[in-house]
Amino acid sequence: MSVEAGAVPRSAARSQLARRVRTGRRAVLVALLIVGGLLMMAPFLWMISTSLKTRSEVFGSPTLFPLVPQWHNYLDMWNALPFGTFFFNSLKLATLNTIGQLISCSMAAFAFAALRFRFREPLFALLLVTLIIPFQVVLVPNFILYRMLPHPLSTSGNWIGTQEPLWVGAFLGGAFGTFLLRQFFLAIPHELADAARVDGANPWQIYRHIYVPLAKPALATLAIFTFMWSWNDLIDPVIYLRDIQTLTVTAGLSLFQGQYVGRWPLLMAGALVSVLPMILLFIVAQRQFVRGIALTGIKG
Amino acid sequence: MSALTPARRPDPRRGGGSLIREGRWALVFLAPTLLGLAVLSAGPILATLAISLTKWDLLTAPKFIGLDNYTALLSDDRFLKALRNTFFYTIVSVPIGLAIALGLAAALNTKVRGISFIRTAYFLPVVTSTIAIALVWQYIYSANGGLLNEVLGVFGIPAQKWLSDPTLAMPSIVAMSIWQGLGVNVIIFLAGLQGIPTDLLDAASVDGAGTRARFRHVTLPLLTPSIFFTGVLSMISAFQVFDQIFVLVKPRPTDATITVVYFIYENGFKTFKMGYASAASWVLFLIVALFTAIYFWSQRRWVYYQ
């Protein structure tokens, strides 16, 4: 920077100009982002608007707002199929999946992060490989496995047609959750564990009283992801469930779609109701959600 | 972590001295995972391979037929079409999706009041189920009275059969998928952007680099690990595309939108050709593995680790 006479006012004017250009540019940017955001939201807004229209309104030229909001569409949709049962089933399965993943993944992550044992690296590598395997590759053998397992309450005598295949596996670990939690566990200074060990704590106590409490944010992230995946899962319910009373919201919606072809107001009402729990969860837990993606994504 | 110990992480590969040596405890902690690997993931991959060498309808005993399923696949027009569609979907949706997400993340990485509200709009499709999303898109794409045709009609563009026209169907599905998947990639890129040390950017400004030059020569190289990572995720999930196809267009009769996973689903769980479906699974697995390997190998040419 020069300090010659006259430079000071000129550079001040220039920096003011630069600032104005920057604010202008930023305003354009924000405007573009808002337009883009509205485009992203458009299908949702269209869903809401359609769900409140009459059947004839839907096939006229599109209007943003229904003439008279047809709130009864929601009631009609709710009564068309046992949606209450579907919600209960989805909630039950999502909760079981979440509990299963939290327990089994945190245990495995602790072993990989804090214990030393033979074959640790190859085992972890094997787990990571399963992360990149398309899950469809195991679809057939899993189906066959569940078909071999006896089930006293099932009409087929095995697990096909029951909800068990949709949650039992969650208690048997998972690559994503283990990877996520291991990343977090590695950041915990192991002086803490060393101190506890000197005081006579065994690994289970270290896991239970040091690692798990410190990893609460990561556990929350895993919980949200698991809940969301379970709630939104479509292919497994479609493959395993038979009886309408056992269906989840997604499978129920798929059935609804087949039965009410072209009745867009009812279908949109159903779609909206089905995603509402996830949208609420997302709004409440946006921070954990974003961190989860970032944590598994970058570091490591 | 205290500020005095910056980012000191034990290197698990070398096993820093104070890790606990306990094989038996490890077995306890890993028991669920090991069982899962054996019966649900790693084990079944081998099982799929074995099943793929048989003819099996689940009702009668499996019959060993060697590689017949694989040779049949290679001359099955539906499977070849499914492969073509899957490649098209992957090759188009992944790069476009990444590019849009990168631009968006750079734009969203500003400190303006209300920015978090705008961000939420971009993330929302990520958390909603594909079936709900596909339902509304089915209506938007609908040939008579669909929103898209009506909007395009205003500009004098004739109505299109977005989902039943064989040439338009896959691009329509790609567009919807990009819209849905954008948020995940934006989040990863945002995290990457926020991890870029500001002093590097400041130093570049002092050296006279403009906004574009800073993005090109500082931000972009430092973001390559994020781009690499989102690339892997997007690619793997693109090869597995199923939900959109299942809900939006049941690919019959023209097969214009059949994908490999839909093919697997149909053969395995509609017509119960377990051997044939397993063979298709293995072909898909090998393709994904090959592409992932190539992609990982390519990273030393373009991914910059700090």
Image: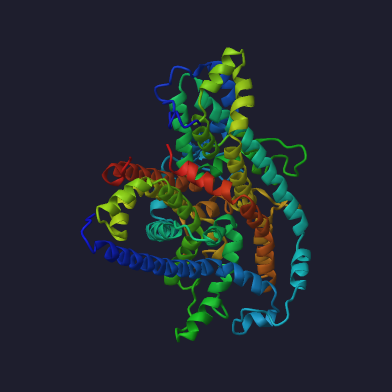
Name the residue nearer the viewer: B113 or A52: B113
Quadrant of image for the C terminus of chain B: top left
Does residue A144 appear anywhere in the picture?
Answer: yes
Q: Quadrant of residue B82?
A: bottom left
Against A193, residue A267 (above or below) is: below
The extreme front residue here reads A5
Q: Tell me where residue A285 appears, x and y as whole percent.
A: 62, 49
In the image, taking residue A286 as reference, residue B232 lies left or right, namely left
In the image, taking residue A278 as reference, residue B151 lies left or right, namely left
Name the residue nearer the viewer: B195 or B164: B195
Q: Tell me where residue B28 appears, x and y as whole percent.
A: 60, 22
Residue at 61% x, 62% y: name it.
Answer: B132
Q: Tell me where residue B98 appears, x and y as whole percent.
A: 40, 56
Q: How is the image coloured?
A: rainbow
Residue at 33% x, 50% y: name it.
Answer: B201
Q: Quadrant of residue A171?
A: top right
Name the residue nearer the viewer: A238 or A67: A67
Q: Across the whole image, how many numbered discs are drawn on residues? A: 0
Against B22, residue A178 (above or below) is: below
Name the residue nearer the viewer: B53 or B31: B31
Does residue A163 appear anywhere in the picture?
Answer: no
Residue at 55% x, 77% y: name it.
Answer: B147
Q: Tell me where residue A219 appears, x and y as whole percent.
A: 60, 38
In the image, taking residue A11 as reference, residue B8 lies left or right, namely right
In the image, taking residue A283 as reference, residue B95 lies left or right, namely left
Residue at 55% x, 40% y: name it.
Answer: A141
